[in-house]
């Protein structure tokens, strides 16, 4: 296969990854890494570098729209970014000392977990009772516009959320994915931030977290231009097309189908990792 | 810099500025990468890709001076890598402008928090972690 053909096929694959990622909210990296490693037989370290760059592109692209709507809680995002960026750099360092087949196995487990998380019932109730002194000191409590008017919410268990966010950062730095599922778990389940706020704030944070580890990976040669170019352009195109379709579309069936596909890819990654093929 | 601060009269101005910044960054990055990609494909399109075994990107494409040098000599892969650098710079610039926005609101706790995040990323860049 020539580089030209390889680039064109990868461009199409990245487009589909971006499309599915934006329709289901899981991000493009989740599909990109199995696609690159299992289908294109690319070393997982190159795949991680490309996926990180793709995560930054899609996060920045969609964050522009969300900030305008006033749902994103910038203070929660900024405060927790201390945790995720620290974690991301630790993750990028751990990656040096971790064999690639172990990385593949961890990736598979995180993928299975992400698929499960996307099926879970979301926390839509805003917590109104103030229980956390830290949340007040840090001015994390907020409000967002909804159809029924302004919804006020109080943030709980800040320390627990911070700890889980550090882990999300480590995973993101180690695997090259946005680890949006873990970020949403920290905000939505632990800190009781309403679903709409936690998903958009997670998206806001993904670009910054990914950039923190990407600066390390760029110096280490994980980001190869021949892969980065089709991946970034394909994923962005797919995400853009996805955001157009998303308006008014019912994504419930798609989400179920996508979760099944992802679980299958996850098992494939774990199997190949255990066999030492990746 | 003063003009930028003056133009932020309230929160929504900052939000729309940051939104524009993000869009412009992503658009510029993909346009640069596409241009580099076309040059790269014209020159190397008929070669065989080799990503099966990890060797890492060429040394000169791992650092800014090398990338700029490559761009100067019109190397396709260096131009793609410049696009990647613009893309990486976009969220980092966003943090910087968030610090400016918090300073305008006189929210110094969050100026500090934002600068800590920026510091961690700069440490990642310059801390010699790239090995």
Image (cartoon, helix red, strand yellow):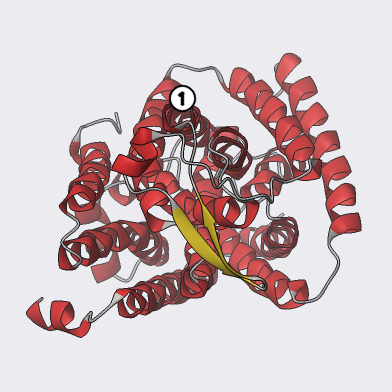
Left or right, B106 with respect to A152, comes to left
In front of the other: B43 or B89: B89
**In the displayed image of the protein, which residue is found farthest to the left?**
B2
Near-viewer residue (B37 or A257) = A257
Q: Of A129 and A39, which appears nearest the observer? A: A129
Mark 1 crowdedness (10 Å alpha carbons): few <14, some 14-19, many ≥20: many
Residue at 82% from the left image edge and 35% from the top image edge: A263
The location of residue A220, given as percent across then percent down, is 36, 36
Instruction: Judge from the rendering whether residue A144 lies leftward or rightward of residue A118; answer left or right.
Output: left
Q: Position of residue B32 (x, y in %)?
A: 41, 73
The residue sitting at 64% across, 61% down in the picture is A7
- Give the chain of mark 1: A
In which quadrant is the N terminus of chain A drawn? Answer: bottom right
- Above-or-below relation of A196 to A107: below
Q: Give the vertical position of A88 relative to B107 (above or below).
A: above
Q: Work out which residue is located at the far front of the displayed protein and give it.
A: A129
Picture quadrant where residue A149 is located? bottom right
**Quarter assignment of residue A187:** top right
> x, y (%) of residue B67?
28, 58
Q: Quadrant of the C terminus of chain A?
A: top right
Tell me which residue sits at (68%, 55%) in the image.
Answer: A25
Q: Give the residue displayed 29% in from the left and 48% down from the top.
A: B60
Helix, strand, or loop for circle 1? helix
Residue tagged by mark 1? A95
The reply to whether residue B2 is visible in this rendering is yes
């Amino acid at each position: 296969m020539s580089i030209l053909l390889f680039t064109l096929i990868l461009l199409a694959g990245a487009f589909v990854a971006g499309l599915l990622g934006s329709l289901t909210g899981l991000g493009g990296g989740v599909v990109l890494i199995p696609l690159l490693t299992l289908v294109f037989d690319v070393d997982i370290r190159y795949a991680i570098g490309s996926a990180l760059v793709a995560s930054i592109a899609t996060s920045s692209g969609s964050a522009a729209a969300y900030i305008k709507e006033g749902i994103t809680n910038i203070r929660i995002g900024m405060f927790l970014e201390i945790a995720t960026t620290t974690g991301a750099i630790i993750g990028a360092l751990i990656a040096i000392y971790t064999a690639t087949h172990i990385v593949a196995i961890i990736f598979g487990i995180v993928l299975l977990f992400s698929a499960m998380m996307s099926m879970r019932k979301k926390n839509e109730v805003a917590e109104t009772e103030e229980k956390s002194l830290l949340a007040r000191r840090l001015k994390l409590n907020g409000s967002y516009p909804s159809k029924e008017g302004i919804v006020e919410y109080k943030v709980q268990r800040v320390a627990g959320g911070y700890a889980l966010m550090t882990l999300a950062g480590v995973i993101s730095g180690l695997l090259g994915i946005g680890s949006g599922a873990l970020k949403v778990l920290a905000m939505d389940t632990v800190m009781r931030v309403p679903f709409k706020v936690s998903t958009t704030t997670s998206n806001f944070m993904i670009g910054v977290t990914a950039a923190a580890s990407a600066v390390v990976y760029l110096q280490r040669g994980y980001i190869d231009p021949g892969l980065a170019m089709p991946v970034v352009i394909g994923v962005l195109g797919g995400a853009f097309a996805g955001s157009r379709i998303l308006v008014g579309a019912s994504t419930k069936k798609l989400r179920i189908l996508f979760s099944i596909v992802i679980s299958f890819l996850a098992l494939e990654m774990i199997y190949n990792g255990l066999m030492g093929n990746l | 810099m003063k003009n930028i601060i003056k133009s932020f009269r309230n929160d929504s101005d900052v939000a729309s500025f940051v939104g524009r910044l993000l869009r412009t960054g992503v658009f510029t990055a993909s346009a640069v990468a596409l241009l580099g990609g076309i040059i790269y494909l014209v020159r190397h399109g008929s070669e065989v890709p080799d990503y099966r075994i990890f060797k890492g990107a060429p040394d000169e494409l791992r650092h800014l001076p090398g990338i700029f040098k490559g761009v100067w000599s019109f190397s396709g892969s260096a131009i793609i890598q410049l696009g990647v650098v613009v893309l990486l710079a976009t969220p980092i610039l966003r943090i910087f402008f968030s610090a400016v926005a918090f300073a305008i609101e006189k929210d110094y706790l969050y100026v500090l928090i934002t600068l800590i995040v920026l510091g961690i990323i700069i440490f990642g860049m310059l801390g010699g972690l790239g090995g």
